[in-house]
Image (spheres, grey):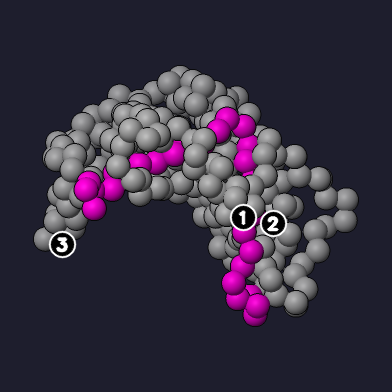
């Protein structure tokens, strides 16, 4: 080729989107629901996204796995790139995917209010201290030290002091700033639900009687034509900068 492909990431459209996919294993009865809430990459957003996940992840597991028993795999994790910070949630489930999506939405609606009104300063400081300790921890092996350097080399960032600055920024985080982040960033962040629907003829679990209907998404995608339409109309970013369609080498996309 005349030029190397340019790695780029698409900015999700505002609102709620659902991307429907079919499973590939006819013996697999489980569906899977993956949520991404996407925010711009910045040091503040890194700090508060890490705190958001650390505080809510145990509650997410307790509510959706332990109490509601939606599935064996129930996870929440942060995702960091040059362009975006995201909160990622996964649930593998025998329940209908749309029903599980409604339960995830309900969880966040309830816990946004909890974070705003009931999260105590002492608990916030305890969680912050844990992340600061993790960031300050020396590598336990040569392999771990290599991985830390390699994570800066692969994206051609070469910012080897970044981890230390993350620790300093985390130590400066406060509860007021966290609550502002939740209100200004997370609550309005675009949501992409990827729903993988089982093709098994074996019945899964029916949603409970009287279950709340899922909120209608702003858009629903399915199939290659919708994928191409999304790629053509999306805003793309590489190394934190927007990439004009048609003005760059072919993209290696990451949705």
> Which residue is under mark 2?
97
Real-space Cα separation, disc 1 to disc 2, in angstroms = 17 Å
> Which residue is under mark 1?
223
Q: Secondary structure at mark 2?
A: helix
In the displayed orientation, state which residue is furthest to the bottom.
27
In the displayed orientation, state which residue is furthest to the right.
210
Can residue 69 be seen in the rendering of this structure? no
- Residue appearing at x 74%, y 52% in the figure: 99
Can residue 20 be seen in the rendering of this structure? yes
> Which residue is under mark 3?
143
Q: Which mark sits nearer the N-terminus, 3 or 2?
A: 2
Compared with residue 125, is residue 92 higher up or lower down, i.e. above or below?
below
Q: Secondary structure at mark 1?
A: helix
Left or right, 174 with respect to 17, comes to left
Q: Secondary structure at mark 3?
A: helix
The x, y position of residue 131, in whole percent, is 33, 41
Magenta-drawn segment: 1-28
**Is residue 20 located in the magenta-colored stretch of the structure?**
yes
């Amino acid at each position: 080729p005349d030029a190397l492909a340019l790695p780029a990431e698409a900015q999700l459209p505002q609102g709620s989107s659902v991307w429907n996919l079919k499973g590939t294993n006819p013996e697999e009865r489980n569906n899977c629901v993956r949520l991404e809430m996407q925010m711009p990459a910045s040091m503040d957003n890194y700090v508060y996204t890490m705190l958001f996940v650390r505080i809510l992840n145990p509650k997410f597991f307790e509510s959706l796995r332990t109490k509601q028993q939606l599935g064996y795999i129930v996870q929440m994790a942060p995702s960091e790139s040059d362009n975006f910070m995201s909160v990622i949630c996964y649930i593998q489930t025998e329940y209908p995917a749309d029903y599980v999506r409604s339960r995830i939405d309900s969880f966040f609606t309830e816990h946004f209010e909890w974070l705003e009104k009931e999260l105590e300063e002492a608990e916030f400081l305890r969680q912050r201290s844990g992340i600061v300790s993790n960031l300050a921890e020396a590598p336990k092996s040569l392999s771990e030290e290599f991985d830390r350097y390699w994570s800066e080399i692969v994206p051609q960032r070469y910012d080897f002091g970044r981890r230390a600055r993350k620790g300093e920024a985390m130590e400066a985080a406060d509860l007021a700033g966290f609550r502002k982040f939740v209100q200004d960033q997370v609550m309005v962040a675009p949501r992409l639900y990827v729903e993988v629907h089982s093709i098994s003829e074996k019945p899964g679990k029916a949603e409970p009687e009287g279950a709340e209907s899922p909120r209608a998404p702003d858009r629903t995608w399915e199939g290659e034509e919708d994928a191409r339409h999304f790629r053509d109309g999306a805003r793309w970013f590489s190394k934190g900068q927007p990439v004009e369609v048609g003005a760059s080498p072919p993209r290696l996309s990451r949705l």
